[in-house]
Amino acid sequence: MAGSLATGRAEVPSSVHGKAAALLLFVAMNVAAQAPPDFGGIWSPSRATGPGAPAPASPLLLKPGYKEPYDARRTLEREASARGEQLAAPGSLCAPYGMPTMMQVAVYPMEVIQTPKQVTIIAEAFSEVRRIYIGKAQISLDDVSPGYYGRSVGRWEGDTLVVETIGINPSVRGYQGMPHSDQMRITERIRRPAPNTLHDQITIADPVVLEKPVTYTLVYALVPNYEMVEFVCDNNREYVDEKGVVRMRLGGAGK
Amino acid sequence: MRLKILVVSTLAVLLGAIPGVAHHSFAMFDSSKQTTLTGTVTEFQWTNPHSYIEIDVPGEAGTVKHWSIEMGSPSILQPSGWKHNTLKPGDKLTVILNPLKNGDPGGLLFQANLPDGRKLGNGPGRGPK
C-alpha cells in the first residue's frame, strides 16, 4: 500500500499493467499499419520504365452501334491530321476536359491536397478541380447532377486509395474520345509505389457502351518546390471553321 | 542517346501519346519547315491556353507584313526562361518558327532571339533549353 501512495496510483495487479501495455502496443502498431500514405504534393505526368512499370492499357472494346461511329470518327481525325488539320475537340473550345481525361493533360502537373476526409485534385491545365470524399458512401446516380467530374468517393485499401466516380455527363468526351452513357463508372486505384512516384490505375466500366471495362495506368513524378501556375483560358485564338477544322485566329485577340 | 530518348518521350507527351491527352495536335503547323523572321513586336500576349507574339515584319519596297506566332502556355514557357514581360511593343526580335501549312502569316515558335542576346525556346523539346 505504501508503494501505491508513493507513486500516487491506485494499486493494480502487475498482470493488468502488462495486458494494458500489450493492448496499447497493439493499437499503436495497428494505427501505424493502417495510417494511409500521404499523396499530397505536385505531380507531373511521367513515364515509368523498367521494373514496377504498370501494364500497358487494355484494348478499348466498344459494343456494336458505338464502335462503328467511333471508328469512323477516328479515321476522319487521322485523315485530317495527315492533311495538316485538326478536328474540333473540347480543348480547342476552352471547355474543361472532365473525368477521366483531366487526370493527365500534356505536360501539365496537378496538385493533390489530402486531408483525412477529402482528397482534392487541382489540375493546372484549365484549373480543373475534383473532390474525393473519403469514407463517405456513394449516393444514387439519380441524385448526382451530371457534370464534368461527377461524384467521387474514396476508401483506403492498405496503401491504395480506391476511388469510385459516377455521374459524368455523356456529353463529356471520354477516354480516347470514346462515347459513354450515364452508366459509366470510373474506378481508380491510386498509390505511391515510390516516394517520388504516383500511379493512378483507371478502370472505366460502362455496361451500355463497352464490351468489357478498359484499364490503363497514369504515372506521375513528384515535382518538389513547384508553384502551380494560373491557367484561365481567356485568350483562345483557336476557332472551328464551317468544316469542323481547328484554325488559328491571326492578328491578335479581338482583331 | 539518353537525351534523345528524353526529348522523344517529352514530345510524345506533348503531342498527346496515349493515355494522356494534348491540348491540340499542332497539325496545322509544318514541323518540317522553319521560317526565320526579323521584325518589331507589336504585342506580347502572356495568356492561356497559348501565348502569342504579334510582330510586324518589313518586306520589300517598304511593305510590312504582320505575323502571329503561337507559343506554349505560361506554364510551358517559364522553364524555357520566359516571363510575362520578356517582350514589349517596339522590341526588335528575330524568331524561328514552323509556319502554318495553309500559308497564312502565322506559325508556331521554335526559337526567339531577344534584344538582350538571349535565345529562348518554346517549352520542352523546342528550341534551346
Image (cartoon, coloured by chain):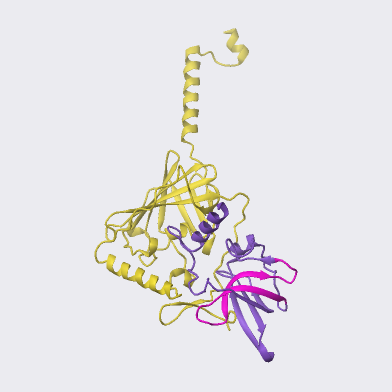
Q: Is residue A248 visible?
A: yes
How many callouts does the rendering have?
A: 0
The chain letter corresponding to yellow is A
Instruction: State the residue lying farthest toward the front.
Output: B1
- Where residue A249 appears, as percent x and y from the top left, is 54, 80
Viewer-proximal residue among A136 and A26? A26
Chain B colour as displayed: purple
Q: Is residue B112 magenta?
A: yes
Q: Is residue A72 magenta?
A: no
- Quadrant the C terminus of chain B occupies: bottom right
Instruction: State which quadrant residue A214 falls in.
Output: bottom left
Viewer-proximal residue among B109 and A140? B109
Instruction: State which quadrant residue A76 falls in.
Output: bottom left
- Where residue B16 appears, as percent x and y from the top left, is 47, 62
Query: Which residue is painted at 65% across and 73% down in the image?
Result: B95
Magenta stretch: give its range.
Answer: B91-118
Q: Is residue A87 visible?
A: no
